[in-house]
Image: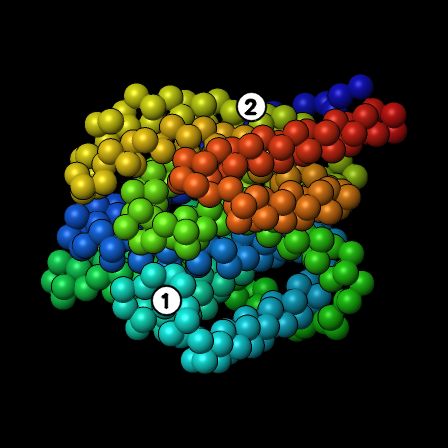
C-alpha cells in the first residue's frame, strides 16, 4: 500500500516554495557562475589554481552542516524544544573557530608543501583559502536554520545576494585591480559574508535564545549519522577536481573545471527540490504524518536533470567557446558529455538520501561511507586521463543510486506492512 497524496494545500505550498528556491538558486548560480567569464582575463594556470582552491572549499562539509541544522531546526519547530538548538548553534560556532585555528596552524607549517602538491602559482592564496573556508562554514549554519523553519523567502534572497556580491567583487578585483586567482577567491568570501549577515539577521531568535544542555545522545544517534551520510555524498560530488589537479596539474584542471562548472549546474538547478522537501519530511516523521513528497520530488528532479543534460549536449559546442578561452575549449567539450551524464544519477540519489536521512533511516550511512572510500581508492588507482576519472565518477554515482533505491524500496515495504 502506498502513502496517500499530500493535501492540495501542502502540495501547492511545496511547488510554490520549490519554484522560488529554484529561481533564487538559478539567479544566484548564474551570477556566481558568471565569475568564470573572467577566466579569459587571467592565465590558464591561474584559472586552474582557482578551480583547485574552490574544489578544496567544496570538500569542506558545508552540506552536512546545513542539513544537520535543517533537521534539528525542523525537529525543534515540531516539538517546541528550542533550547537544545540554541546550544547546538553555540557549540558549532566554537567548533568552527577551533577547526579554522588548527587549519591556520597547519598552513603555517606546511604552506610550501601544499603549494607544491596543489600546483599553486601563488602560495599567498593559502591564507585566502582559510578565510574562504571559515566564511563558507558560516552560511550553511544560517541557511540550515532558515531551511528548517521553512523560511525559504530569505534563504533564497541570501543565495541571490551571495552570487551578486561574488560577481561584482570579482569583476572589480580582476578588471580594475588586476587581481587573479587569489583575488577571485576573496570575492567568493565576500559573497558568503554578505549571505551570512542576512542569515544571522533572520535567525537571531534561534541563536540568541537561552541555550539548553548539549544532548550527547542526540549527537550520537542523529547528528553524527546525518553529517557522515551527507559528507559521503558531498565527497562524491566534489572530490574529482582535486584529484585531476593532483595528477595532471593546473593547466589540465582548467578545461576539466570548465566542464565541471557547466555540468554541476544541473545539480544546482534541482537541489532546491530536495532542500524544500527535507524539513517537510522531518516534520512529517516527527509528527507521525504520511506523505509522498519524495516521489514528486524524484520525478521532477529526473525531468529537470534530463532536460539539462540534453541542453548541454546540444548547446555545449556553442556555449563553451563563448564562455571560456579558446585555448582549452576542445578539451572541455571532450569531457563535457561524460561530466553531465555523471551528474544525473547523483541528482536522483541526492533526493533519496535526503528522504531516507530525514526519516532517520541511518542504516544507509555505512554503505554511503564505503562507497565514498571506494571512490577515493579507485581514483588513486585509475587516472590515466581526465575522462577515465569521470567514468569512475559516473560508475560510482550509478552504484550510489542503486544502493539508495534499494534502501528506499525496503523503507516502502516496511511502511506498507505497517
Q: Which of marks 2 and 1 is in front?
A: 1
Q: Which residue is drawn at 66% across and 29% down?
A: 402
Nearer to me, 20 or 385: 385
Image quadrant where residue 355 sits = top right
Would you name the residue on which mark 1 appears?
Answer: 116
Labelled disc at residue 234: none
* Rendered residue at 37%/21% (across/down): 310
Q: Nearer the viewer, residue 103 or 241?
A: 241
| Residue ID for mark 2 | 299
Q: In which quarter of the image is residue 325?
A: top left
Q: What element carries label 2?
A: helix
| Position of residue 73 in the picture relative to residue 302 (left or right) | right
Up-down relation of residue 43 to residue 408 (above or below) = below
Q: In this view, does 229 lie above or below 399?
A: below
Helix, strand or loop for disc 1? helix
Compute the Cα span from label 2 to label 1: 45 Å
Specify whether residue 87 is in view.
yes
Task: Please name the colour scheme applied to the rendered image.
Answer: rainbow
Q: Quadrant of residue 11?
A: top right
Residue 145 position, x and y percent, is 56, 56
Which residue is the extreme one toward the left? 176
In the rendered image, residue 315, in percent from the top left (x then y), is placed at 27, 25
Residue drawn at the location 64% of the way across and 39% of the way down: 353
| Picture coordinates of residue 147, whole percent (x, y) | 55, 49
Say whether disc 2 or disc 1 marks the residue closer to the N-terminus.
1
User: Would you say 31 lies left or right of 407 here?
Assistant: left
In this view of the protein, can residue 273 be seen by the observer?
no
Quadrant of the snapshot with the N terminus: top right
Residue 66 in the image: above or below residue 128: above
Which residue is farthest top?
Answer: 1
Amino acid at each position: 500500500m502506498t502513502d496517500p497524496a499530500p493535501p492540495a494545500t501542502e502540495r501547492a505550498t511545496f511547488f510554490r516554495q520549490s519554484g522560488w528556491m529554484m529561481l533564487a538558486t538559478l539567479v544566484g548560480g548564474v551570477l556566481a557562475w558568471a565569475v568564470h567569464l573572467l577566466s579569459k582575463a587571467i592565465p590558464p594556470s591561474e584559472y586552474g589554481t582557482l578551480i583547485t582552491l574552490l574544489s578544496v572549499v567544496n570538500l569542506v562539509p558545508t552540506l552536512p552542516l546545513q542539513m544537520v541544522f535543517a533537521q534539528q531546526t525542523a525537529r525543534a519547530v515540531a516539538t517546541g524544544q528550542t533550547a537544545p538548538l540554541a546550544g547546538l548553534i553555540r557549540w558549532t560556532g566554537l567548533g568552527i573557530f577551533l577547526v579554522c585555528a588548527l587549519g591556520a596552524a597547519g598552513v603555517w607549517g606546511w604552506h610550501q608543501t601544499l603549494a607544491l602538491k596543489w600546483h599553486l602559482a601563488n602560495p599567498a592564496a593559502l591564507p585566502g583559502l582559510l578565510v574562504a573556508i571559515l566564511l563558507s562554514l558560516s552560511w550553511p549554519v544560517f541557511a540550515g536554520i532558515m531551511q528548517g523553519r521553512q523560511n525559504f523567502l530569505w534563504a533564497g534572497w541570501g543565495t541571490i545576494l551571495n552570487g551578486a556580491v561574488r560577481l561584482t567583487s570579482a569583476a572589480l578585483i580582476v578588471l580594475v585591480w588586476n587581481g587573479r586567482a587569489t583575488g577571485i577567491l576573496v570575492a567568493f568570501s565576500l559573497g558568503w559574508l554578505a549571505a551570512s549577515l542576512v542569515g544571522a539577521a533572520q535567525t537571531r531568535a534561534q541563536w540568541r535564545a537561552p541555550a539548553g544542555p548539549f544532548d550527547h545522545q542526540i549527537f550520537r544517534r542523529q547528528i553524527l549519522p546525518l553529517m557522515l551520510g551527507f559528507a559521503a555524498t558531498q565527497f562524491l560530488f566534489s572530490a574529482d577536481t582535486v584529484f585531476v589537479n593532483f595528477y595532471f596539474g593546473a593547466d589540465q584542471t582548467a578545461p576539466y573545471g570548465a566542464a565541471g562548472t557547466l555540468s554541476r549546474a544541473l545539480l544546482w538547478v534541482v537541489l532546491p527540490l530536495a532542500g524544500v522537501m527535507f524539513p517537510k519530511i522531518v516534520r512529517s516523521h516527527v509528527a507521525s504524518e504520511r506523505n509522498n513528497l519524495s516521489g514528486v520530488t524524484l520525478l521532477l528532479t529526473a525531468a529537470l536533470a534530463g532536460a539539462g543534460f540534453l541542453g548541454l549536449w546540444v548547446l555545449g559546442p556553442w556555449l563553451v567557446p563563448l564562455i571560456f578561452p579558446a585555448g582549452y575549449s576542445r578539451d572541455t567539450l571532450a569531457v563535457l558529455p561524460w561530466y553531465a551524464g555523471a551528474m544525473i544519477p547523483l541528482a536522483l540519489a541526492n533526493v533519496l538520501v535526503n528522504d531516507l536521512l530525514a526519516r532517520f533511516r541511518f542504516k544507509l550511512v555505512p554503505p554511503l561511507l564505503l562507497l565514498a572510500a571506494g571512490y577515493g581508492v579507485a581514483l588513486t588507482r585509475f587516472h590515466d586521463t581526465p575522462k577515465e576519472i569521470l567514468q569512475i565518477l559516473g560508475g560510482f554515482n550509478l552504484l550510489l543510486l542503486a544502493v539508495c533505491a534499494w534502501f528506499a524500496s525496503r523503507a516502502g515495504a516496511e511502511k506498507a506492512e505497517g
